Image: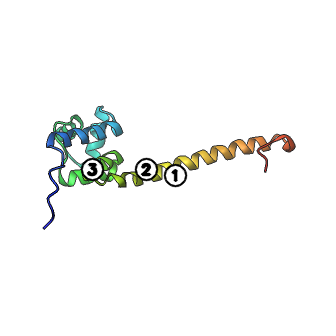
């Protein structure tokens, strides 16, 4: 038997609003967002609109399909499961890509500076 810790799971309304906020942050609230939700989940249009508006939240397999595609929904799901410490792991690939892009920009700048032919006056030259 598990010890009772109290009811910390959000109400249905809070859950629906939380998923809607996550979806809107990632997709916006346009008709294109509805189309994307349909593509991701195979849900019907009315269901996707309800998720996006916060009128209802996804259940079961739909939630799993959303989590497969949406980092924002995954982060919200981990938060309501009180596992939000894992949410930082989600961001690592994006952070890595940003760092790689920044390094490429630095390398391009260094390459441009080295092409000037005046290596003695270039403080970045190693």
The Cα atoms of the two marked residues, 1 and 3, are separated by 23 Å
Q: Earlier in the sequence, mark 1 or mark 2?
A: 2
Q: Residues within 10 Å of mark 2 (few under 14, many from 20)?
A: few
Q: Residue at position x 30%, y 55% from top?
A: 83
Q: Residues within 10 Å of mark 1 (few under 14, many from 20)?
A: few
Q: Secondary structure at mark 2?
A: helix
Report the side of 92 relative to 126 (left or right): left
Report the side of 125 relative to 61 (left or right): right
Q: Residue at position x 25%, y 54% from top?
A: 64
Q: Earlier in the sequence, mark 1 or mark 3?
A: 3
Establish if 7 lies above or below 34: below
Q: Which residue carries the number 2 mark?
A: 91
Q: Earlier in the sequence, mark 3 or mark 2?
A: 3
Quadrant in which the N terminus appears? bottom left
Q: Secondary structure at mark 1?
A: helix
Q: Residue at position x 27%, y 53% from top?
A: 82
Q: Residue at position x 15%, y 62% from top?
A: 3
Q: Are marks 1 and 2 in contact (CB under 8 Å)?
A: no
The Cα atoms of the two marked residues, 1 and 2, are separated by 9 Å
Q: Secondary structure at mark 3?
A: helix
Establish if 71 lies above or below 25: below
Q: Quadrant of residue 57?
A: top left
Q: Which residue carries the number 3 mark?
A: 77
Taking depth in this image into account, of 6 and 92 the one nearest to the observer is 6
Report the side of 108 relative to 46 (left or right): right
Q: Residues within 10 Å of mark 3 (few under 14, many from 20)?
A: many
The Cα atoms of the two marked residues, 3 and 2, are separated by 15 Å
The circle drawn on residue 96 is 1
Q: Position of residue 114 (x, y in %)?
A: 79, 44
Q: Position of residue 118 (x, y in %)?
A: 86, 41
Taking depth in this image into account, of 116 and 1 the one nearest to the observer is 1
Q: Position of residue 45 (x, y in %)?
A: 20, 39
């Amino acid at each position: 038997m598990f010890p009772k810790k109290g009811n910390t799971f959000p109400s249905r309304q809070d859950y629906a609003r939380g998923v809607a906020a996550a979806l809107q942050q990632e997709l916006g609230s346009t008709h294109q967002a509805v189309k994307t939700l349909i593509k991701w989940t195979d849900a019907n249009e009315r269901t996707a609109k309800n998720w996006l508006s916060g009128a209802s939240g996804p259940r079961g397999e739909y939630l799993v399909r959303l989590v497969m595609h949406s980092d924002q929904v995954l982060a919200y799901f981990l938060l309501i499961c009180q596992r939000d410490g894992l949410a930082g792991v989600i961001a690592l690939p994006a952070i890595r890509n940003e760092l790689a892009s920044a390094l490429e920009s630095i390398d391009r700048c260094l390459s441009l500076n080295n092409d000037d032919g005046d290596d003695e006056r270039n403080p970045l030259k190693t």
